[in-house]
């Protein structure tokens, strides 16, 4: 875990950069701006750029920037991502997240998630309290790899905290902290698991985007394994494969033992390596009075060509 605390002069530099973006590129439109984002991000403070270079080359599992600028007159927390989109609230914060994200990776989105937007809102929504989506609240968001079902899932999940009055934790399990018996690791490394789409990708007709994948749960370098798991949606690929199903249950116990909690403060942005950690969120009681927990979220990929190949176009939104 790595953290960089932004100094006051660096915060001012970022604020000026946000002003420039909003003045020079017209009404804020993340999809229009994203192709310029890496160039503009070259003007972020040098410590921020160096931080992200190091995060990338070390494969840092959890990285946090603290003390990013927040608007003095931040709008009340919307009641769900759709309300956020209708009202366009938190656009300065989206610029901050876009620029810092562009220093690490390439933002992209999903056609069937949050209306195809590439900057998402994570806030509680009435009626979604018990769902397995980012609009949930009274139910915990169980541990997951972001978009585990898809080959083109992100390399990093970026979450920028605008409000978190009750100090609700983001739960994190780092693959390096798992102490798995060799026999369990072996089963989890076999392509015996079905990674099904999560609720945030299942549209009104029950359709999902992207192919359902049969794959391993553990893969990658033996000295630092990669992880692909969604405890709500990963199951044994073959119906009668009890060993595979039991391996998921056993992994769950290990994951609970290794679980850590990161409480995001307003002005913190966390960058979770989606191959090296699974993440979730503690349950909480929503208020729906404008003061609720509110994050902006972006999916980042290291090589945008993987998205272009998935979309068979130069679109950053996977249908
Ligand atoms: O709310 C959080 O801290 C995590 C949310 C999350 O997992 C997500 O939005 O993908
Ligand atoms: Fe997530």
Image (cartoon, rainbow, N blue to C red):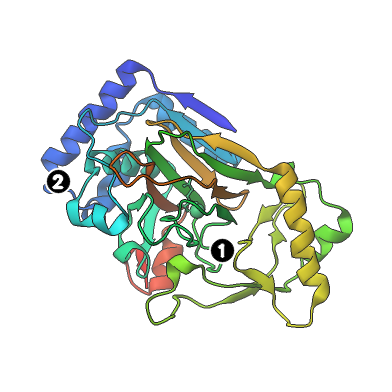
* Ligand 2 within 8 angstroms of badge 1 C-beta: no
Q: Residue 302 appears at what percent x and percent y?
A: 47, 52
* Ligand 1 within 8 angstroms of badge 2 C-beta: no
Name the residue tied to disc 2.
Answer: 25
Residue 295 falls left or right of residue 89? right
Which residue is rendered at x = 32% and y = 44% of the image? Answer: 98
Check contact, mark 1 vs mark 2: CB within 8 A: no
Name the residue tied to disc 1.
Answer: 148
Tag 2, which secondary structure?
Answer: loop
Q: Which of pointers 1 and 2 indicates the residue nearer the eye?
A: 1
Which residue is rendered at x = 83% and y = 62% of the image? Answer: 186
Residue 127 falls left or right of residue 229? left
Tag 1, which secondary structure?
Answer: loop
Mark 1–mark 2 distance (CA, rounded to whole Å): 34 Å
Q: Residue 255 appears at what percent x and percent y?
A: 71, 50
Sequence-first tag of 1 and 2: 2
User: Which quarter of the image is occupied by the C terminus?
Assistant: bottom left
User: Which quarter of the image is occupied by the N terminus?
Assistant: top right
Which residue is rendered at x = 43% and y = 44% of the image? Answer: 159
């Amino acid at each position: 875990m790595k953290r960089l605390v932004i100094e006051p002069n660096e915060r001012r530099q970022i604020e000026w950069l946000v002003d420039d973006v909003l003045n020079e590129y017209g009404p804020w439109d993340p999809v229009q701006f994203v192709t310029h984002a890496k160039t503009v991000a070259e003007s972020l403070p040098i410590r921020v750029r160096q931080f992200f270079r190091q995060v990338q080359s070390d494969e840092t599992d959890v990285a946090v920037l603290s003390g990013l600028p927040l608007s003095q007159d931040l709008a009340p927390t919307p009641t769900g991502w759709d309300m956020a989109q209708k009202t366009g609230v938190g656009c300065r914060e989206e610029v901050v997240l876009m620029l810092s994200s562009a220093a690490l990776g390439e933002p992209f989105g999903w056609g069937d998630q949050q209306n195809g937007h590439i900057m998402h809102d994570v806030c509680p929504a009435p009626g979604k309290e018990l769902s397995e989506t980012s609009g949930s609240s009274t139910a915990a968001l169980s541990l997951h790899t972001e978009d585990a079902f898809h080959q083109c899932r992100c390399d990093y999940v970026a979450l920028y905290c605008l409000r978190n009055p009750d100090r609700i934790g983001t739960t994190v399990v780092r693959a390096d902290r798992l102490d798995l018996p060799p026999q369990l690791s072996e089963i989890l490394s076999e392509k015996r698991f079905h990674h099904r789409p999560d609720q945030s990708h299942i549209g009104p007709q029950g359709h999902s985007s992207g192919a359902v994948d049969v794959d391993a749960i553990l893969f990658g370098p033996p000295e630092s394994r990669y992880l692909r798991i969604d405890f709500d949606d990963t199951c044994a690929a073959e119906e009668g494969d009890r060993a595979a199903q039991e391996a998921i249950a056993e992994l769950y116990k290990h994951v609970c033992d290794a679980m850590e909690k990161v409480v995001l403060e307003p002005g913190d942005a966390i960058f979770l390596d989606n191959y090296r950690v699974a993440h979730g969120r503690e349950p909480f009681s929503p208020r729906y009075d404008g003061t609720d927990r509110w994050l902006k979220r972006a999916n980042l990929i290291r090589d945008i060509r993987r998205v272009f190949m998935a979309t068979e176009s130069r679109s950053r939104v996977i249908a």
